[in-house]
Amino acid sequence: MIDILFYVFAALALGGAMGVVAGRNPVASLLSMVVCLASVACIYVLLEAHFLAAVQIIVYAGAIMVLFLFVIMLLNLGHDYQPDLKAGLWSLLAFGLSGAMFGFLGRQFWGSSAMIATAGAAVDAQVEQYGAIGAIARPLYTTYVVPFEITGILLLVAIVGALVLAKRNV
Amino acid sequence: MNGLAPLFFMITSTVKVVTVFSVLMVAVAYTTLAERKISAWLQDRHGPNRVGPWGILQPLADGVKNIAKEETMPGTSAKPYFVLGPMISMIPALVTFAVIPFAAPLPTPWGTVPMIVADVPIGILYIMALSSLGVYGLVLGGWASNNKYAFLGGLRASAQMVSYEVALGLSLVTVLMVTGNVTLTQVVFEQQRLQLWYILPLSLGFILFVISAFAETNRLPFDMPEAESELVTGYHTEYSSMKFSMFFIAEYAHVITQSALMATLFLGGWDIPVWHGDDAFFFQGQWISGFDAAGAPVLAALAWWKTLLTLGMFLLKTGFFVFVYIWVRWTLPRFRYDQVMQLGWKVMLPTALTYVVVIAGTLLVLDEVGVPFGLRFGLVLTAVSAVATGIFVFWLDRDRIIGGASHPARGPLPPRMPSVDVPKLPASVGGD
């Protein structure tokens, strides 16, 4: 059952991802993106990573994509939108690059089920002890607290930078 | 996980899904009637009273009307999105109710059935996630209509949702910090253990949550996306018959779910006040009612009549908040759009952030001092929150936020008319 659901959501995610680049209408692309994000969230649920799934939906599908939609609608990008990427050399390059990345990923994880099994057991023990959210919160606020906070400051700097840049033109 | 046999779990879950869905749909229908009846009452009118005694069959008539009505499809609309809009807005509104516990668990010969459709481990985050998806329906509907008023409504909806979701989430953080978990069953249980509903220990959180919830449901005074006096009817201007009805159902389902959520988060959910016989929580494979002095779990005494009583309590609290929604709608005027944005970003967000820090600090101090989780713990939090609420309300006086003609920045008011002494009429004038 879980296997079947996995393939369904994986197909949906891939289809959504294809729709983002293939669609000619910006709103259609955005909705495909939402479908893709939601399907990935469903795969997280199948892996019992409930918290990650919820955050994926809240942050990406629920907030960032709504902002994208807002911007697309505000600029009123038309129904006939010319694709930036022309067929030919660029698409070949992009295809080759993504193929290489997939190959690298496959090489990393091919036949490493033993490693995944041990890591999975460790994660299960953590979840058992601290709950689904505690298992994420603990390392985030103890071991990795400095990188976590620095990421926050980085985002703040980005926002301030965007404001400064935008203000100059107003 | 619930200690139930898989088959029994399947059967009870199906029954619960069907029952909750039907009850929710009927409640939505009758909330529309309640809205019209209460508005009539507030405005000294009769309200709908033609269909059935006291108009109680009015929702049925409305349904028939909406189904039988001609369905219009604007020629210049983007059709797939135009059809998709109402669907996307309706589904999240209906499924969010699944994680709200609505009564004490029901003991049966085959095992104890928890009175919640799905006690998922992420509880409240599930509600946040799905309710944040609902806005796509409004935005898409408004955009696909190809009508400038609908379009403006959609734009407003997206901006408003994003703005108020931040404050909503932050006001929830305080609840989750005190509870220590995100499942709503535990939120209810910790309120029973605290012997105080969170409305007192987290009073400012409650105020912030209610304001944000009004904004999230697009109800007056925050109904910017459908402001009738500015945008015809906003995002659903071009919709008719059942498609319009679906937006309508979504709005009322949202109202009911948010009311149930307020009742659960801040008024103890299905908890009956003072009496502790109803306390129940699923803890390490058994139903407990609390912990004794040594910290050992005490088994809960469950009974079917307690389930019924608590269900009644839950419906009462939810009904109260639904009434408040309607009451506010027919009492307060609408904000201006810039005021909505200012309130969201300049008032709600900083206040919620500060409040999270204050509550976190208080919890840290209480834990360090070693106050056990109970009444005393709650009273300290109540005192801190009361001070915070007092400061907030003092700061949020009308002159500053609403900024009408009497705002100090607008200069001195024109001189008032000199008051004239009106001679009082003798009491005997006018008949006897």
Image: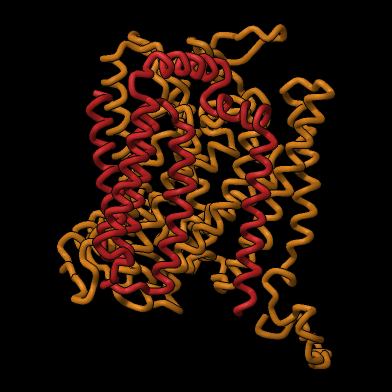
Chain colours: A red, B orange
| Left or right of B233 on screen, residue B144 | left
Residue drawn at the location 32% of the way across and 77% of the way down = B147
| Left or right of B421 on screen, residue A75 | left
Q: Nearer the viewer, residue B156 or A46?
A: A46
| Left or right of A107 on screen, residue A64 | right
Above or below: residue B270 compared with residue B138? above
In the rendered view of the protein, which quadrant contains the C terminus of chain B?
bottom right
Above or below: residue B356 compared with residue A135? below
In the rendered picture of this protein, how many numbered marks are placed on residues?
Answer: 0
In the rendered view of the protein, which quadrant contains the N terminus of chain B?
top left
| Left or right of B392 on screen, residue B342 | left
Above or below: residue B374 compared with residue B88? above
Q: Residue furthest front?
A: A89
Residue A136, percent from left and from top: 56, 29
Residue B63, percent from left and from top: 23, 57
Residue drawn at the location 78% of the way across and 30% of the way down = B364
Q: Nearer the viewer, residue A163 or B383?
A: A163
Q: Nearer the viewer, residue B249 or A129?
A: A129
Q: Is residue B381 visible?
A: yes
Residue drawn at the location 81% of the way across and 86% of the way down = B412
Q: Is residue B54 visible?
A: no
Residue B417, percent from left and from top: 79, 93
Q: Nearer the viewer, residue B64 or B386?
A: B386
Residue B172, percent from left and from top: 60, 42
Above or below: residue B66 compared with residue B309? below
